[in-house]
Each structure stands twice: as structure tokens, then as C-alpha cells.
Image: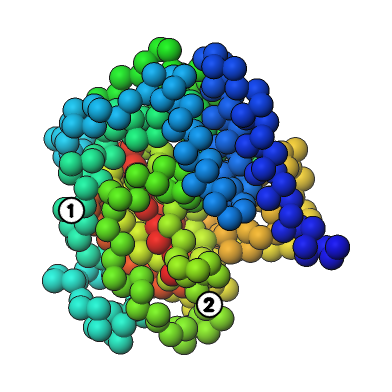
Amino acid sequence: MSHGASVCCWPRLYTDASIIRSLASLDGSFSSSRAAIARLDRAIIVAGAAGEGRLDLILTLIRRIQTEFLSYTRDSFRTFSSRQMGDMLRLPPSNIPLKSSLHRIPALDPPPSFMAFQTTFNRSPLVLYKYASSWPAINEHPWSSASYLRFIAGPARMVPVEVGADYRADDWTQQLMNWDDFLSTLELNDYDLPTNLATPTAIGSKKVLYLAQHNLFMQFPDLRRDIVIPDYVYSCPQPPSDYPQYKPPGNDEQLVINGWLGPRGTISPAHTDPYFNIYVQIVGRKTIWLAPPYVSEYMYAFDKNDVQAHDSSNPASNKANPLTSNTSRVDVFTTVKDDDSPRRFPAFWTNVVPHAISTTLEPGDLLFIPPGWWHAMRADETSFSVSMWF
């Protein structure tokens, strides 16, 4: 057997073993039911539910276990509040512009046609305000409702979370966590956690927990019905002149959809992605910073020399990962007056800031980012976003 074939077999083996062990250990008790669901979720998260028909089988098994042994029903679907984040107590908007950008991200109104996007508007970032304001995720199936998010998953589900506000930090790590426990750490609407469904979390209350870049829609497919995939993602754009190495995602859809859910203060540091990105804000406000590919030499990205010189006691810290050559060491959300960033990264402040653009997204706003553009995100309150790489 070739090395490539053996690599492909391991996810399938892990998936099948997880299914068999979950069924073999299931005795109808509360604890065995929760353990079985956790194993099945791991097969999705760790191995991608590899194998033909395995994902559907796993989701069916999870629902059966929830229904038969954990008293889960779906007949209360209509009871969820559709109150929006705008109706909730919100933080006042900041009147202090980012020191690291001098311009706003351009906005279009009305949105461009499919043909106009395909031929003209796919080369530079743009914002379409309130583009998604009619989506079910913002209205009849509100993702701002903790009760809805708990209901759509059912009890005993597990999700991968990042522990720490910034993946460049030495104390940053990742772990699997109970979905209900994770929701209990967020300031969401109508949170009411049943004591018989959640397990105590081992994470300290002061730790920032962030569900980031995760295919939540594979685990909870009902959530995908709450969003409307924009036609723009099927426009098959040509590689940009400033990023000629662009290739679409390699899956059948040539589309990767990820969820991003976390509290106020979570940060995605300035980095680049190899795909076109449509980024939609569903819950809460998020401040976005962008800079064009031609400023890359002034972004102070981590490189192999940085990795070799980095002596981290935490192997999970992404500063020790050579793949972070697409991540900047500059904190673009610095206030400058309280930071020595201009002294440490002078070329950034001289050559990047004049070309950088920024904005704050509200629920329903859509942001388009071409490949190769530097971008950073900061949650200004509890935030739920969806990214679509194409």
C-alpha cells in the first residue's frame, strides 16, 4: 500500500471505529448516550466523517440517540424569539477610528448584478450593507438566540474551540468542548441552559473561547438552511493580477463555508487567505481591517527564521507554526499611544497604513475580500459570522 493510500485510509478507519464503538458502548443510560454522541462528533471534527454515506449515518445516529435516550424533541421549533441584536442591550459604537487605516472599505448600493460582479467588482474589497438582513438566521431562526442554537444541535454535542483571544499568543490552545457549555460563555439572547444537559467546563471563566474557521454546517446541517448562498460565489472569477497563484477550493462545490462564533474581544490577526471570500455578519458588530497584497513586504509576517528563534513552551501556539508566514506580527488594532508598534514595525506605519481600509460590520452586512488581501477582524460584541471561500 502506498503512503498516500494509507493516509487516506486513516480518516475512514477512525470514522468507522468511532461508529462501532459508539454503538457497542450504548446501554441507554444518560452517560453512555452522551459519550456515544461525543465520539460521533469527533468522527466529524477529526476525520471529516470519511467514507461514502458516513456523515448522513452519523447525523442520523446522533439524532436517534438524542431522541430515544436524552428526551430531545423538535416540536418546540416555533417557540424561539426572533428578537434581533438591535433590540438587545448593545455597546455604544466607538467614535475612535483605527489608527492603522486611513480609509473606509468602499460600499455599493444597490448590490452589483451577477455579471457586473463577474466582470468588474471582484478585484477589490467592497461592502454590501444589509445584504443579508432578510436571511432566516437574522429573522425567524435567529442565531442571536442561544435557545435556538442549542435546539438546532440537540443535547450532548461537541465542537472545537480556540482557547485565547489571539492565536499568536503563547497561551493559546485548542480543545473540544460541549456545545451547551460553550454557548453559556457568550452574551447571547434568551440563554437558558438546562442543568441536566450541560457538563461543567474545565475552562476558567476568564479564558476567551472562540469557535473559529469550523465547518459548523457539516455538524449542524439545519444551520445551512438559515443562510442564502449568494450567487457571487459561483461566478468563477479569474485569478487577480496581484495574486496569480489563485485556485478555487478543491472540493466538489469549489466552496468552503465556515462559522465564526465568539465573545467580544476575539481577534483574527492580520493574515492572508488564498481564496475569494464572502464574509457575512449575522450577530453583533465586528471591525474589519484590510490592506492590499502589494504591501506584503511591509507586514512583518512570521517566517522560518522567526519560527526557529521562537522558544514557546506551548506547541499549539501558532507562532511556532511555519504556516503562519501568512500572518503579521503587527497588531493592527493597537491604539498607538499605548503601544510601541511604530518603533518596532516602522515600515508598516509608513507604507501600509496609507493604503489600509477598514469598517465595522453590523448584522446583515456582507464583505467581499479578494485572495491575497491582508485582513484582520475584531469582535466588538458577541459575534457570529459566516465566511464563504470560493
Query: Measured from the top left, where is residue 56 in percent x and y?
Result: 49, 47
**Residue at the spot of label 2:** 247
Q: Identify the residue at image location x=28%, y=66%.
A: 230
Please name the colour scheme applied to the rendered image.
Answer: rainbow
120 to the left or right of 180: left
Where does the image place residue 380, in percent across and percent down from the top left? 33, 42
Q: Nearer the viewer, residue 331 or 327?
A: 327
Q: CA–CA distance between discs 1 and 2?
A: 30 Å
The residue located at (65%, 23%) in the rendering is 25
Quadrant including the N terminus: bottom right
- Give the quadrant of residue 177: top right
Residue beneath label 1, please? Answer: 133
Residue at image point 76% right, 57% down: 7
Front position in the image: 218 or 324: 218
Query: What is the crowding at mark 2: few (fewer than 14 residues within 10 Å), some, or many (at least 20)?
Result: some
- Which kind of residue does numbered mark 1 sit on? Ser
